[in-house]
Each structure stands twice: as structure tokens, then as C-alpha cells.
Image (cartoon, rainbow, N blue to C red):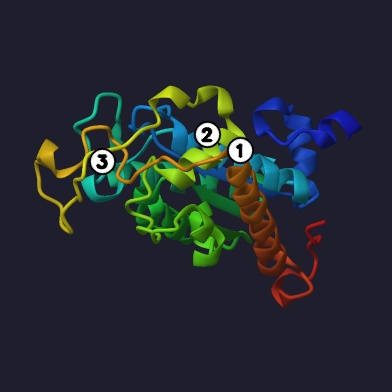
């Protein structure tokens, strides 16, 4: 394999021969799963996908991994964690659709010989459906050897990591939709997409702790952000991205390291 192809992390940029070589080298394959969902008046609709792809590519560059094209639509946006479906631009897939997509991608990668697979979430509502897809795929692998990790980038963060952004106290991950953490990450990872002049106060509305169908528009702030995005910064976003990538790499090394997995004694370690 040429040095240039070795440096590439996007599967779509590789030829089939180069991709085959990565598989034969036991590369970790990552699938970002995001959404097309409103993210306030200052962030683009594909925020969840952009963050997941950017972080996946950074992880892949550290682990000689490969990043598949993302699943760019997500499971149903909930009012208490995503603002709901009433905002124009949000596209909700049925949970069974997400499950089927993830199952099919994993099954196909296993068919080609991939043994280490990561589903990296950028949209919280995808979590149970991607897990279900991974479980169903494993049932169909017919003895093929594959390990699958399903994880959201926020799962590796500790309260102390985000505390500096919230002198008044962290409102919780559900309300952190299109607020300071996502805005900080986007300022660091995709600054040209952030409408800085639209970062402002939001209505004092707290989504109810239940889901009503159909959801009343009055249940969420009209701006779309569920908490105040003011105070976000590119510097803090870069700091968070570094922490997230470091921890994801450490997690994958630990989980996929053949020295710690007797059943994987013939595999290569993550560099």
C-alpha cells in the first residue's frame, strides 16, 4: 500500500484494493451515525453528523483506522433532548430503519472480513436503535469473528470535563442540545458553519419530563436550543475534542488489544 493511501482515513477515498489491504491489516472501521435535526438558529442541521464524522476521523488517524460514510439521518428527535419534530429541516427516521441500516452495514463489513467495528454516535436518540442493529447483525454473522463497540462521543466525558463551561451548574446532557458544548465543538471542528451573530439568549422554557404525541410547540424554546449557547468557545471545543479523542483511542486500545483478548490472539494491536 502506498504511503498516500495509508494516510487516508475515509473509506470512500480508497480503492477496493486499498480497502482490502486495510481489512487484512485488521484496521478498526468506524461508522459515524448522526442526524439531520434542528440545532438552534446558529448551528447547521447536520451538526450531529459533522461532529461524529470529525471525531471519527481524528480517532482513525490515531489508530490506522478507516471511517465509513456516515448515516446522516437519525431516529426521531424528542422535545426534551432535541427539540422535537416541529422545526423545519428535521428529518426523523423510524427506529426500525436505523436498526436495519446499522445491521446491514455491520453485516456487510463482516462479510468482507472486518473484525473490529465502532459505531460512533452523534445523535442521542440513535443509541438504542444502533445497539439493536449491532445485536441483530451479530446473530447473522454465522461464526464470523467481529467485535462491535457502540458509543456516543459524550459517553466518555466526565462532569469535571465540562464544568468550566457551566459556572451556574451543568443542566444535563438532554438540555445540552445546540447549547454550549455542541456549539464549542462546532466552533473548533467546523467554524465556518456556525452563525456567530445568532448565538443569543433563549426562551425560559423547560421541556416536560415526558413525551407527548403530537408534541406541542410550546414545550421547547422557540429558538431550538434547549439551553443557553452563550459562553461557548472554539478553545474549549478544541480542548473537549482532544479529551474525547484521547479517551476513545484509549478505550479502543483496551477493548480491541489482542494482548488483553485471548480470543483475538492472532490480531494486530491498535498502534
Secondary-structure class at tag 1 = helix
Badge 2 vs badge 1, beta-carbon distance below 8 Å = yes
Badge 3 vs badge 1, beta-carbon distance below 8 Å = no
Front residue of 163 and 138? 163
Which quadrant does the N terminus fall into?
A: top right
Residue 141 can be seen in this image: no
Secondary-structure class at tag 3 = loop
Residue at left offset 58%, top offset 44%: 237
Residue 49: percent from left, percent from top? 48, 36
N-term-proximal mark, 3 vs 2: 2
User: Alpha-carbon neighbours of circle 3 within 10 Å: few (<14), some, or many (≥20)?
Assistant: many
- Residue occupying the far front of the picture: 167
Q: Which residue is mark 1?
A: 54
Residue at left offset 65%, top offset 60%: 247
User: Alpha-carbon neighbours of circle 2 within 10 Å: few (<14), some, or many (≥20)?
Assistant: many
Residue 179, placed above or below residue 197: below
N-term-proximal mark, 3 vs 1: 1
Secondary-structure class at tag 2 = helix
Left or right side of 220 for 51 = right
Residue 103: percent from left, percent from top? 45, 48
Q: Which residue is mark 2?
A: 50
Q: Nearer the viewer, mark 3 or mark 2?
A: 3
Residue at left offset 32%, top offset 51%: 175
Q: Which residue is mark 3?
A: 83
Residue 191: image quadrant is top right
Residue at left offset 49%, top offset 65%: 159
Distance of mark 3 from mark 2, alpha carbons?
19 Å
Residue 198, placed above or below residue 113: above
Front residue of 179 and 50? 179
Residue 66 can be seen in this image: yes
Amino acid at each position: 500500500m502506498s504511503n498516500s493511501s495509508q494516510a487516508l482515513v475515509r473509506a470512500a477515498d480508497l480503492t477496493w484494493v486499498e480497502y482490502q489491504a486495510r481489512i487484512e491489516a485488521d484496521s478498526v472501521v468506524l461508522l459515524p451515525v448522526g442526524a439531520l435535526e434542528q440545532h438552534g438558529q446558529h448551528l447547521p442541521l447536520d451538526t450531529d453528523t459533522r461532529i461524529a464524522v470529525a471525531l471519527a476521523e481524528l480517532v482513525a488517524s490515531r489508530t490506522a483506522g478507516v471511517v465509513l460514510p456516515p448515516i446522516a439521518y437519525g431516529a426521531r428527535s424528542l422535545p426534551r433532548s432535541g427539540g422535537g419534530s416541529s422545526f423545519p429541516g428535521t428529518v426523523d427516521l423510524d427506529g426500525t430503519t436505523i436498526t436495519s441500516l446499522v445491521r446491514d452495514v455491520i453485516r456487510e463489513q463482516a462479510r468482507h472480513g472486518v473484525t473490529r467495528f465502532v459505531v460512533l454516535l452523534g445523535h442521542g436518540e440513535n443509541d438504542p436503535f444502533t445497539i439493536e442493529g449491532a445485536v441483530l447483525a451479530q446473530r447473522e454473522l454465522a461464526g464470523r469473528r467481529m467485535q462491535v463497540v457502540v458509543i456516543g462521543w459524550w459517553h466518555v466525558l466526565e462532569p469535571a470535563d465540562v464544568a468550566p463551561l457551566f459556572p451556574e451548574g451543568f443542566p444535563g446532557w438532554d438540555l445540552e442540545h445546540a447549547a454550549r458544548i455542541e456549539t464549542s465543538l462546532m466552533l473548533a471542528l467546523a467554524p465556518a458553519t456556525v452563525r456567530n451573530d445568532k448565538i443569543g439568549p433563549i426562551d425560559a422554557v423547560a421541556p416536560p419530563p415526558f413525551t407527548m404525541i403530537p408534541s406541542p410547540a410550546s414545550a421547547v424554546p422557540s429558538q431550538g436550543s434547549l439551553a443557553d449557547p452563550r459562553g461557548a468557545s472554539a478553545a474549549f471545543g478544541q480542548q473537549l475534542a482532544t479529551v474525547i479523542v484521547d479517551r476513545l483511542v484509549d478505550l479502543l486500545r483496551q477493548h480491541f488489544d489482542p494482548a488483553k483478548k485471548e480470543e483475538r490472539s492472532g490480531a494486530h494491536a491498535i498502534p
